[in-house]
Image: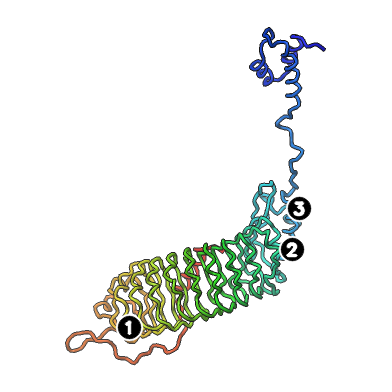
Amino acid sequence: MKLTSKTTIHLAATADRHTQTFIIQYFPKMNSPLAFSFPLLLLLLFFFLSSIPSVSTISPHAKKQPPNGMLPSEAETLFKIMDSMSSDQSWRVSYPNPCKPGSSWPGIECKQGNDGYLHVTRLDFGTRPNPTCKKTATFPYQIFSLPYLQSVFFFNCFTHTKTTLSVSADRLYNSSLQQLSLRSNPALVGSIPPQISSLKFLQILTLSQNRLNGTIPVQVGNLRNLVGLDLSYNSLTGSIPSTIGQLGMLQKLDLSSNSLTGSIPDSIEKLSLLAFMALSNNKLTGNFPKGLAKLQSLQYFLMDDNPMFIPLPVEFGILVKLQELRLANSGYSGSIPPSFSQLNNLSTLSLQNNRLTGEIPVVFGSLSHIYHLNLSRNFLDGVVPFNSSFLKRLGRNLDLSGNPGLCLNPAEAYSVKIGIGVSICGSNKNGSLIKPVKKSQAPRGLQKSFSLFPALGAFALHYMLFLV
């Protein structure tokens, strides 16, 4: 069929507005020299544009989401975890769509992935409104099969049926877990599995207040993204592995209330970001690391109740960011290093129940941030170097008792109503002050001494640094 101008006009009229615009702008008028080719080109253009699908057309490759917005396999894994952990309700019946907005489970968080599906990112068990754990609950290894799971919290879950953390490395390689917290689980026993080092994205590991035993695996040094490590209040034995020094991102280290032995490894000096270190209530001995002064980010150092029996290291005075220093009940001897007077940010200093001798450094009275000072039950002597302003500011948070060689200047004593545990210096015939001559009542052995105020302060500090 031969295309005429009339045919061309009809095609142009039936084309859509965009096609008409294209014709007007890019094709010559019918009386131009190229008019002989225009009908053919216009016909080809019309059929080409007609073959382009509308933008509203749904791609045949688009994924259809299931009713609950989750992958069926992931939802089934979640149901198995809930069925084994909690009997609060029939989860499959009460909450058939675990991640559905408006009807999601308590203790669960979900986020949409790049694939368009909803994925579980957080699980929280143990305290209401989160699901509580039944007596037969054991550690659900299936959590490592949830590929998008980032945070897991089990608080007071495993209380009756003994369970362990035993898992195979194969289950951990595909895990995206960043925070694993298991606290206050009296039925959680056994050792910390070395395979836990396969959680390459892990940033916070909290295994405190359980009944874990054995040694700290050296493989823990492979958790290079770790920011917080809390293994406190267990029954761990052996020494602190030197591989701890490989955790260059670490800011919090709590190994307190175990039965760890040996000395603090020298590799600890590599932890340049470490702000909190708690090693209290262990069996640690020996000298401090030579590179202790390199921990310039350290703000809290808690190491009460260890049989150290060495002089206080002067290096502590170089850690100028220190806010809290606790070295009580550990057999430290000699005098208090004058370098401690450089700790201008110090708010708490606990040196009670040691074997310290000599006088209290005079410059202690100029520590403007100090609010708790306990030097009780030592062998300190001399006149207390604190003025009435200092004594009033600390009040009952100052304890100098159990140092029979100490005495307080009468002028300061009369202006302070609260006792600090020392007697008032007497006067001789010349009017000069004399010290008490009572027989020393300072303890020969170590005694446990705890103050409610500092205990609460240390407890609150854990949650201030890391919410677990």
Residue 183 visible, this orientation: no
- Rendered image: mark on residue 358: 1
Look at discs 3 and 2 and give the one toward the viewer. 3
| Percent x, y of residue 388 | 28, 73
Total number of numbered discs in the rendering: 3
- Residue 232 horizontal side relative to residue 428, left or right: right
Mark 1 neighbour class, 10 Å CA radius: few under 14, some 14 to 19, many 20 or more: some
295, above or below 379, in the image: above
- Mark sitting earlier along the chain (3/2): 3
- Rendered image: mark on residue 402: none
Residue highlighted by disc 2: 83
Q: Quadrant of the N terminus?
A: top right
- Residue 458 horizontal side relative to residue 152, left or right: left
Look at discs 2 and 1 and give the one toward the viewer. 1
Residue 348 visible, this orientation: yes
Secondary structure of the residue carrying numbered label 3: helix
Say which amino acid is labelled 3.
Pro
Q: Quadrant of residue 33?
A: top right
| Percent x, y of residue 15 | 72, 18
- Mark sitting earlier along the chain (1/3): 3
Say which amino acid is labelled 2.
Asp
Q: Quadrant of the C terminus?
A: bottom right
- Comparing 157 with 53, the one in front is 53
Looking at the image, what colour scheme do you see? Answer: rainbow
- Residue 17 horizontal side relative to residue 3, left or right: left
| Percent x, y of residue 3 | 78, 11
Cα gap from disc 3 to disc 2, whole angstroms: 16 Å
Residue highlighted by disc 3: 72
Secondary structure of the residue carrying numbered label 1: strand
